[in-house]
Image (cartoon, rainbow, N blue to C red):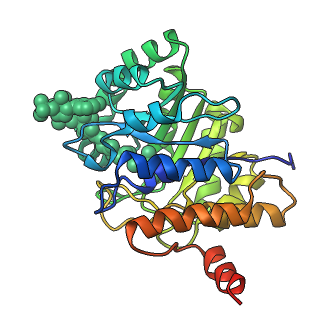
Amino acid sequence: MNNSVRIVEVGPRDGLQNEAAHLPAATRVAFVERLIDAGLSTIEVGSFVSPRWVPQMAGTDTVLRSLGSRPGKAFPVLVANEKGLDAAIAAGAEEVAIFAAATEAFSKKNINCSIAESIERFRPVAEKTLASGLRLRGYVSCVLGCPYEGEVHPDQVVWVAIALRELGCYEVSLGDTIGVGTPTRAVALIDQVADAIGVERIAVHFHDTYGQSLANIFASLQRGVRVVDAAVGGLGGCPYAVGASGNVATEDVAYMLGGMGIETGINMQKLLNAAEYITSALGRVPTSRVYSAIRPLSRL
Ligand code: HMG
Ligand code: MG
């Protein structure tokens, strides 16, 4: 097994976009600084979407500007359309992500258009992104289940993943938005998408609603996947996926990878500090298993 895995920390974006509390940019920057200090090198720091739809992500331009460009660090942001891309470029973004869905109902609820329309909406976004020298990542949501349409077949995912690759995405993150997947189905999906775009182009993005994320990630790793999205403290959710819970916790993924002898470069104590910082800003504690296991011991 190739001995390195890239973790894409999505806490500042996926983790905060569904919270009742709308955290100010300064708090979000301080959170990202703690994640950097913990050793994370790819951190999705926000999104340029309509503030009418997701007010929690307003101020992402300030977050990006405050962070600036750092050697060896990537701060991708979601962009919903050309307006979002222009604002992201003006704020100094070096990488953006576009996001499509595997089901029509979710596409309509999340970005107010059909899947085919979303691909066409993203075409000029992708062209301008690449022409401007930025990196382009893609997401497909609802790859294993949809809150409105139920179980999703891999065929529904494959064509969207191909479309994102054709738009120039260097990587396609497969989102189990509502966390219903189990390892057997996750692996069947990955095999089918890998046949179409290559396993080296796949990232996995599991929400942990049913507690299946680590099992799904382990199974995905065995199929050759080497990029895992996660959110510190188990933060996360999508405002348009009611009932879905947080992302798999970064600290739980890091613990599992460490146990498998896979290097992540993460300092666990500092990562838990970042988790504590942001969850206390939200008025609670991290939901991760590692936090529950380690924090009481550190107070003995
Ligand atoms: P719309 O209402 O159809 O579009 O929304 P619109 O063009 O009529 O825009 C509505 C208003 O928003 C207008 O303002 C626009 O100017 C403004 P008004 O004239 O009413 O004052 N607007 C913007 N403002 C700032 N930046 C922008 C922007 N765009 C429009 N970029 C739209 C369509 C796509 C914009 C909307 O549906 C939207 O923003 N959706 C984003 C939803 C979202 O962010 N969801 C969460 C991220 S996806 C996710 O979490 C899944 C993932 O984690 C993977 C997984 O788990 O599966 C990635
Ligand atoms: Mg997500």
Residue 107 in the image, given as x and y percentages of width and height? 30, 42
Q: Residue at x 70, y 66 (%)?
A: 269
For the question of whether residue 113 can be seen, the reply is no
- Left or right placement of residue 244 versus residue 49 in this view: right
Residue nearer the viewer, 296 or 234: 296
Q: Residue at x 61, y 34 (%)?
A: 74
Farthest residue to the bottom: give it. 300
Q: Residue at x 83, y 55 (%)?
A: 262
Q: Residue at x 35, y 19 (%)?
A: 86
Residue 300 in the image, given as x and y percentages of width and height? 71, 90
Q: How many marks?
A: 0
For the question of whether residue 177 can be seen, the reply is yes
Residue nearer the viewer, 282 or 127: 282
Farthest residue to the top: give it. 131
In the depicted structure, whether residue 187 falls above or below residue 111: below
In the depicted structure, whether residue 12 falls above or below residue 249: above
Residue nearer the viewer, 23 or 184: 23
- Left or right placement of residue 170 versus residue 96 in this view: right
Residue 9 in the image, given as x and y percentages of width and height? 58, 49
In the depicted structure, whether residue 203 falls above or below residue 144: above
Residue 180 in the image, given as x and y percentages of width and height? 47, 65
